[in-house]
Image: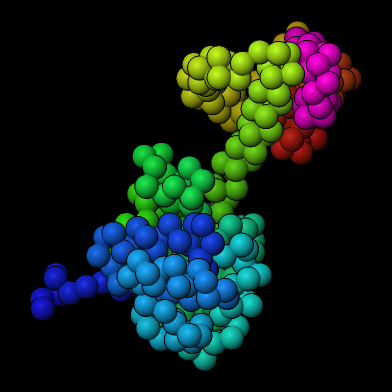
Amino acid sequence: MSAQTSPRSVSVVGLGPMGQSMVRAFLDAGVEVTVWNRSTDKVDAMVELGAKPAATVADALDANEVTVLSLTHYAAMYDVLGQATDHLAGKVIVNLSSDSPEKARKGAEWVRSHGAQFLSGGVMSAGDNITHPASYIFYSGPREVFDAHAELLRPLSPQEYLGADDGLAQIFYQALLTIFHPWLLAFDQATAMIDRSGHSIAQFVPFAVRSAAAFPYFMEEFSVANQNGGWATLASLKMMDAGAQHIIDASEEVGVDATFSHTAQSFWRKAVAASEEKGEAVSTYALLRGDKV
């Protein structure tokens, strides 16, 4: 076989929902996959699809040059790879697990101390649906390592290489999750309000989708403002405080927990107080950023 037609191969360690999705994506692209997981039932399920089982972590590392990790956090990487540190030399570890940027940097240092190369990744996907059109993966680490293995990793999702800083993929990934988590809670609160008011969530959702079309506009506008200290006038801050109270009232009138909205309101009120004390508008962005006001 020529180099162009030789089957590519990779190892995947960690077979939670995301890890299983990665195995399927590799297999669908014709990549040979060796898998390892603590619980063998998940290994068996992937073997049925065509993956090869590894009895140990060492076997998984030995099977291929590149091993992709899909674990709960970086602490799990030490637990797993720590079983076979003498098999890391000359290998490439691509850790697509979620954690803090600094933990990613320390993890990269640890992997390299054992003679392996390292890439960090953050998987931005619709749940574990890595084939969704909106899914993609942030990568960071040495550019030459990414370039050498980008083609092998391409089946997982479109790629966004950010830079050499090992923590950079996690900075962008966690920043986007910072947006997603409040949205998820807000959506739960909103639909609970609709339901407890005796109305149809199904009837409401198209309007939620419709209003979300304005979010890119707000993000672009506020991003410019936040590069210049944040968006705020005293009148607008007081308006947001009043608006938060209306949300709280609408929720609590029908027995829906409005803790999240109380928290949001507390930030508007902090900004109002800081603005009145300083004699000029202080944005919630400045407060969250930790600026001295």
Is there any visible trace of residue 22 in the rendered image? yes
Quarter of the figure with residue 248: top right
Residue 263 colored in magenta in the image: yes
**What residue is rendered at 41% in x and 68% in y?**
46
How many numbered marks, from 0 up?
0
Give the answer, above or below, for where 209 lies relative to 28: above
- The image shows residue 108, relative to residue 245, as above or below, that is below
- The x, y position of residue 122, in whole percent, is 50, 54
| Quadrant, the N terminus | bottom left
Locate residue 28 relative to residue 56 in the image: left or right.
left
Q: For residue 107: magenta?
A: no
Residue 233 visible in the picture: no
Q: Residue at x 30, y 72 (%)?
A: 32
Q: Nearer the viewer, residue 247 or 174?
A: 247
Position of residue 131 in the picture relative to residue 104 (left or right): left
Residue drawn at 50 percent across, 68 percent down: 42
Q: How is the image coloured?
A: rainbow
Please name the residue shown 56% across and 80% down the image. Answer: 81
Q: Quadrant of residue 44?
A: bottom left
Q: Residue furthest bottom?
A: 86
**Residue 186: x and y, percent?**
68, 28
Q: Position of residue 155 (x, y in %)?
A: 32, 57
Q: Main secondary structure of the magenta part?
A: helix
**Which image quadrant: the C terminus?**
top right
| Coordinates of residue 200 in the picture (x, y in percent) | 61, 16
Near-viewer residue (39 or 250): 39
Q: Which residues are the magenta region?
A: 238-267
